[in-house]
Image (tube, rainbow, N blue to C red):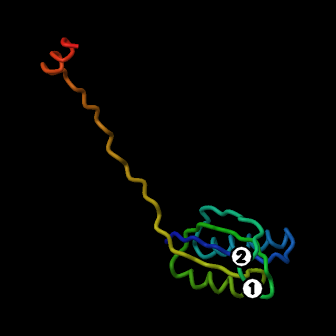
Amino acid sequence: MNYYEVLYIVSANLSDEERAALVSKFHEFVERNGGSLRSETEWGLKTLAYPILKQDRGYYFLAYINLPASAVKDLYYFFRVTDGFLRAMVVKKEEKKVESTPKETEVKEEPTEQSEEVQENV
């Protein structure tokens, strides 16, 4: 199971209910193919850099998923054949592993004879 970042754009011509249904279709696809949704963020309505299918705006979504490598090709096919998705990009990511840092040991300085002499002279 690999970790992927998925950025997809949904048509701005859809109603809120249609957009929610399209997003849930994506979630169902991931689960049906043995994956899991880690997190998803809606970036909102953005103006596209160039028109896609004669549309100049779209709703951006960023999702992080776990998915078998064999299902990525099917995921691209799903985005192409499902009406409402304008573009999609899937990028394999490395999971961040938290490394445990060794605890810093406190070093206590013991007073030396020189430091005692300096203190007496002051």
Q: Is residue 63 left or right of residue 55?
A: left
Q: Earlier in the sequence, mark 1 or mark 2?
A: 2
**Picture quadrant of residue 51:** bottom right
Amino acid tagged 1: Ile
Residue 52's mark?
Answer: 1
Q: Is residue 113 above or below residue 92?
A: above
Q: How many marks?
A: 2
Label 1: how many residues lie within 10 Å, few (<14), some (14-19) or many (20+)? Answer: few
Q: Nearer the viewer, residue 67 or 11?
A: 11
Q: Is residue 112 left or right of residue 87?
A: left
Q: Position of residue 30 (x, y in %)?
A: 63, 73
Q: As drawn, which residue projects farthest toward the top?
A: 120
**Picture quadrant of residue 34:** bottom right
Mark 2 lies on residue: 9
Amino acid tagged 2: Ile
Taking the spot 69% from the left edge, 87% from the top edge, the residue there is 80
Question: Does dot 2 land on a helix, a strand or a loop?
Answer: strand
Q: Position of residue 31 (x, y in %)?
A: 63, 71
Q: Nearer the viewer, residue 12 or 98?
A: 12
Mark 1 touches mark 2? (CB < 8 Å): yes
- Spatial CA distance of label 1 from label 2 is 10 Å
